[in-house]
Amino acid sequence: MPAFFRLQRFCFQREDAMEKPEDLIIPKSIAIILDGNGRWAQKRNLPRAMGHKAGCETLEQTVEDCVRLGVECLTVYAFSTENWKRSALEVGALMRLLRFYMVKLIDVANRNNVKALMIGDKSRFEKDIIEGINRLEQATAGNTGMKFVFAINYGGRDELRRAFGRMLCQMKENKLSPEEISEDVISSCLDTAGLPDPDLLIRTSGELRISNFLLWQIAYSEIYITDTLWPDFNREELLKAVESYNHRERRFGGR
Ligand code: FPP
């Protein structure tokens, strides 16, 4: 039976706990570039903000589906350092949604034993949003299941810039020397310190770009691109991505 149907049966149709079929591989860490909210809204003659709202609902479902699949870490690109260039109207709508969903996510995360974490530079947000982020992280800190990493005001280059700053500070305090800078040291200075690198990177809405997402961490990620717009990315689409991952041969540069 194709991997898609076995995944569906194993994760979403079983009534009793059942061993995972040995040959099915669930990526430990999935990262998603959420794209296509605007086009989804445009196709329906709706304002772009409605596309983002629909995207938030899809995100909630995806968090729950990834928990059921047994994913250990889900990282999503929700607002980039470049997204501030959008119209004030759209940025305002996104900030309103952010305020609302940070509260809603506490519930979704606690219901699913999910630990929510934010990556990106929080300092640019208004005070109440920063407080909301802290509240969400604190309220879910004790959860031991999947980690849900929400990248906001995040850019891969900006993250590296801030990591270099951290390393320089450690050098100034004589806690680090240039010879000691290893890949592990660099990873430990990133926002994602301690989190697994993505095994699978998904991008919706067909663009063939990385868009400054997790530049260091996706060195060996398998990439899956679908034309589906983010709000339409349902469980079936997620399973298709995981099925595609099951057909990849990962060599990490070796033979
Ligand atoms: C890209 O679609 C999507 C975004 C810029 C934001 C997506 C994030 C969410 C739905 C999650 C919630 C995030 C917040 C901050 C509340 P697009 O607008 O670029 O779509 P287009 O390429 O079709 O125009």
Image (cartoon, rainbow, N blue to C red):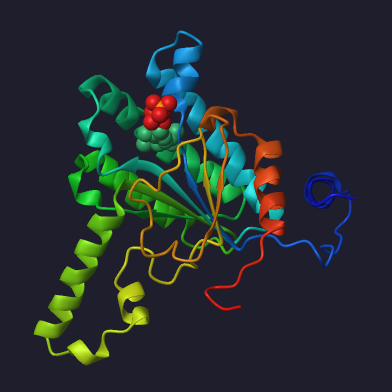
Question: In the image shown, does 103 or 121 lie closer to the viewer?
Answer: 121
Asked whether, in this view, residue 138 is left or right of residue 123, the answer is right
Where residue 111 sits: x, y (%)? 61, 47
Where residue 187 sits: x, y (%)? 35, 73
Asked whether, in this view, residue 96 is left or right of residue 148, the answer is left
Q: Residue furthest top?
A: 45
- Taking the spot 50% from the left edge, 68% from the top edge, the residue there is 196
- Taking the spot 58% from the left edge, 58% from the top edge, the residue there is 146
- Taking the spot 37% from the left edge, 80% from the top edge, the residue there is 184
- Taking the spot 38% from the left edge, 70% from the top edge, the residue there is 193
Where residue 78 sits: x, y (%)? 40, 41
Quadrant assignment for the C terminus: bottom right
Asked whether, in this view, residue 16 is left or right of residue 51, the answer is right
Q: How many marks?
A: 0
Where residue 197 sits: x, y (%)? 48, 66
Q: Is residue 52 in view from this perspective?
A: no
Q: Is residue 228 in view from this perspective?
A: yes
Task: Note whether 174 is above or below 30 in the view shown.
Answer: below
Asked whether, in this view, residue 106 is left or right of residue 226, the answer is left
Q: Quadrant of ligand 1?
A: top left
Task: Note whether 3 is above or below 59 in the view shown.
Answer: below
Q: Residue furthest front?
A: 255
Q: Quadrant of residue 113?
A: bottom right
